[in-house]
Image (tube, rainbow, N blue to C red):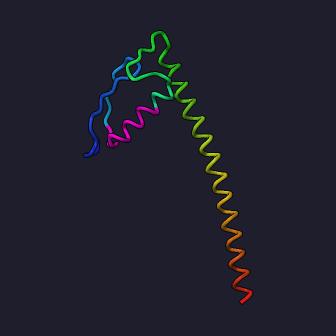
Amino acid sequence: MAEDERLVEIRMMGLDFSFYTDASDVELEETIALVQDLVGVEPDENVGTIPMGKIAILACLNIASRHVRLQREFDQYREDFERRLSNLSNDIRALITEH
């Protein structure tokens, strides 16, 4: 455990979870909110008869879906950036050769 890690205890889906983290309070709140959104339950909501494995797989599928989308967006951004950089380089080269 790192020096700046602390023990955090949360309740989610009717279960108590304890873990160590060095995340700030804001990061921790955002992380918990994201997980709650991914599994689709409120913090103290009991999931009843829904198997935990099914909830975990659904959350994983949501995370994977977001990752794939972000990866595609990043790849498109990188291609656009490289194209613009190449065009700018060509424009600079053309200006230099004119003078």
Q: Where is residue 14 in the image (x, y as percent from the top left)?
A: 38, 17
Q: Most extreme residue toward the left, as rendered?
A: 3
Q: Is residue 54 magenta?
A: no
Q: Is residue 63 above or below residue 52?
A: below
Q: Residue at x 74, y 87 (%)?
A: 98
Q: Main secondary structure of the magenta part?
A: helix
Tell me where residue 2 sits by quadrant.
top left
* Residues shaded magenta: 21-34
- The C terminus lies in quadrant: bottom right
Q: Which residue is drawn at 68% across and 65% down?
A: 84
Q: Is residue 2 above or below residue 52?
A: below
Q: Which residue is drawn at 36% across and 41% down?
A: 26
Q: Does the magenta stretch include residue 28?
A: yes
Tell me where residue 18 sits by quadrant.
top left
Q: Residue at x 70, y 63 (%)?
A: 83
Q: Is residue 66 above or below residue 71?
A: above
On screen, residue 72 versus residue 94, left or right, reads left
Question: Which residue is at the front of the view, 96 or 71?
Answer: 96
Q: Position of residue 19 (x, y in %)?
A: 32, 32
Q: Most extreme residue toward the bottom, as rendered?
A: 99
Q: Where is residue 38 in the image (x, y as percent from the top left)?
A: 51, 29
Question: Which residue is at the front of the view, 30 or 56?
Answer: 30
- The N terminus lies in quadrant: top left
How many callouts does the rendering have?
A: 0
Q: Position of residue 75 (x, y in %)?
A: 64, 51
On screen, residue 9 versus residue 42, left or right, reads left
